[in-house]
Image: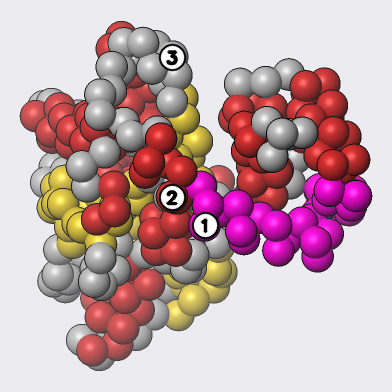
């Protein structure tokens, strides 16, 4: 204990999480050389390489993996005892917040959030990552602070707050040869579809809902997220079902049009989710309030012009 600064152990935990010396340095507010020197000192102290380079980044040795498990348990105790966040000042804080969301957030929420941060919390940093099947664990361990999106309830120990309610639309290219100002159920079932297979969100329940309504969908292509939809729809005759917020963005390009579905689907809630361990954390309370206000601001804006009369409900 006399030969090592316990703060240096934070480098091991962050390097395990990122697998990158440069990302570790950025997240901890250090230089890359400082991280490298710290790692060299820790290797000497523990008599183990701790991390080795692989094709996918820096990977921990078995010894380091066990050590990190002990450090994580110790960190929870130390943070509670020595680093209580009894006060949070967004104007002066340089805290890094880790958010999980869908890729739609990069177009809808993130620009507004970044604008608000630049004004009220210029040094606060954000780390945005995708929702996944691992999101609940990340929230529970504190590796993620907040999860935002169409997210099913996560169970005991998790808190959920509704940000807004919305609905689904379908999107096609503006000059689709068979679909004009509206789409019939017969057209919907006969055309090929572009399907989004995101994980960790409630969007995957869409398939089950369509099946329960005895609605057939012929899948021509599956993509892992929403970012690739626009490029594909613009050059094909595919149909895609998207959240209304995504449909509004796609219609702004002029190359696509959004249409009401020819049947009724249940609406959905976009929520923010966190673990109850961090309910009273002042920084987390501030972040949740900021996110809520960003979405309220968005819903209060007048709707933008749409390409199709059937898309005005956005």
Task: Out of 95 and 240, give the one closest to the viewer.
Answer: 95
Q: Residues within 10 Å of mark 1 (few under 14, many from 20)?
A: few
Task: Out of 202 and 301, give the one closest to the viewer.
Answer: 202
Q: Residues within 10 Å of mark 3 (few under 14, many from 20)?
A: some
Q: Residue at x 31, y 83 (%)?
A: 208
Distance between the Cα atoms at labels 3 and 2?
27 Å
Which residue extends farthest front? 2
SS type, badge 3? loop
Distance between the Cα atoms at labels 2 and 1?
7 Å
Distance between the Cα atoms at labels 3 and 1?
29 Å
SS type, badge 1? helix
Disc 1: which residue: 73
**Quadrant of the image occupied by residue 10:** top right
Q: Measured from the top left, where is residue 223 in percent x and y?
A: 55, 62
Q: Are marks 2 and 1 in contact (CB under 8 Å)?
A: yes
The reply to whether residue 52 is in sight is no
Q: Residue at x 64, y 46 (%)?
A: 13
- Residue 77 is tagged as 2
The answer to whether residue 69 is magenta is: yes
Label 3 or label 2, whichever lies nearer to me, is 2
Q: Is residue 183 above or below residue 246?
A: below
Give the magenta range: 46-75
SS type, badge 2? helix
Asked if residue 34 lies left or right of residue 310, the reply is: right
Q: Residue at x 70, y 57 (%)?
A: 67
The reply to whether residue 278 is in sight is yes
Q: Is residue 12 above or below residue 273?
A: above
Q: Measured from the top left, where is residue 243 in percent x and y?
A: 29, 54
Disc 3: which residue: 123
Label 3 or label 1, whichever lies nearer to me, is 1
């Amino acid at each position: 204990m006399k030969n090592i600064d316990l703060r240096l152990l934070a480098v091991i935990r962050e390097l395990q999480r990122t697998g990158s010396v440069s990302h570790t340095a950025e997240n901890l507010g250090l230089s890359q050389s400082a991280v490298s020197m710290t790692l060299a000192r820790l290797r000497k102290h523990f008599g183990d390489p701790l991390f080795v380079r692989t094709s996918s980044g820096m990977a921990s040795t078995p010894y380091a993996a066990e050590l990190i498990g002990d450090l994580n348990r110790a960190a929870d105790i130390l943070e509670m005892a020595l680093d209580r966040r009894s006060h949070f000042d967004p104007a002066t804080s340089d805290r890094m917040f880790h958010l999980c969301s869908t890729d739609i957030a990069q177009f809808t929420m993130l620009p507004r959030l970044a604008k608000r941060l630049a004004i009220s919390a210029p040094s606060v940093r954000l780390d945005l990552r995708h929702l996944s099947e691992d999101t609940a664990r990340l929230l529970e361990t504190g590796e993620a602070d907040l999860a935002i999106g169409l997210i099913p309830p996560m169970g005991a120990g998790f808190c959920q707050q509704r940000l807004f309610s919305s609905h689904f639309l379908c999107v096609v290219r503006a000059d689709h040869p068979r679909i004009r100002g509206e789409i019939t159920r017969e057209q919907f079932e006969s055309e090929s579809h572009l399907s989004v297979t995101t994980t960790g969100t409630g969007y995957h329940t869409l398939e089950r809902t369509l099946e329960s309504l005895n609605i057939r969908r012929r899948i021509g292509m599956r993509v892992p997220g929403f970012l690739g939809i626009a490029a594909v729809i613009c050059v094909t005759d595919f149909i895609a079902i998207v959240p209304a917020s995504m449909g509004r963005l796609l219609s702004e390009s002029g190359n696509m049009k959004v249409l009401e579905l020819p049947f009724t689907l249940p609406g959905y809630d976009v929520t923010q989710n966190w673990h109850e361990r961090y309910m009273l954390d002042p920084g987390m309370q501030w972040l949740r309030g900021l996110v809520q206000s960003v979405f309220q601001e968005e819903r209060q804006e007048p709707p933008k012009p749409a390409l199709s009369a059937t898309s005005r409900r956005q």
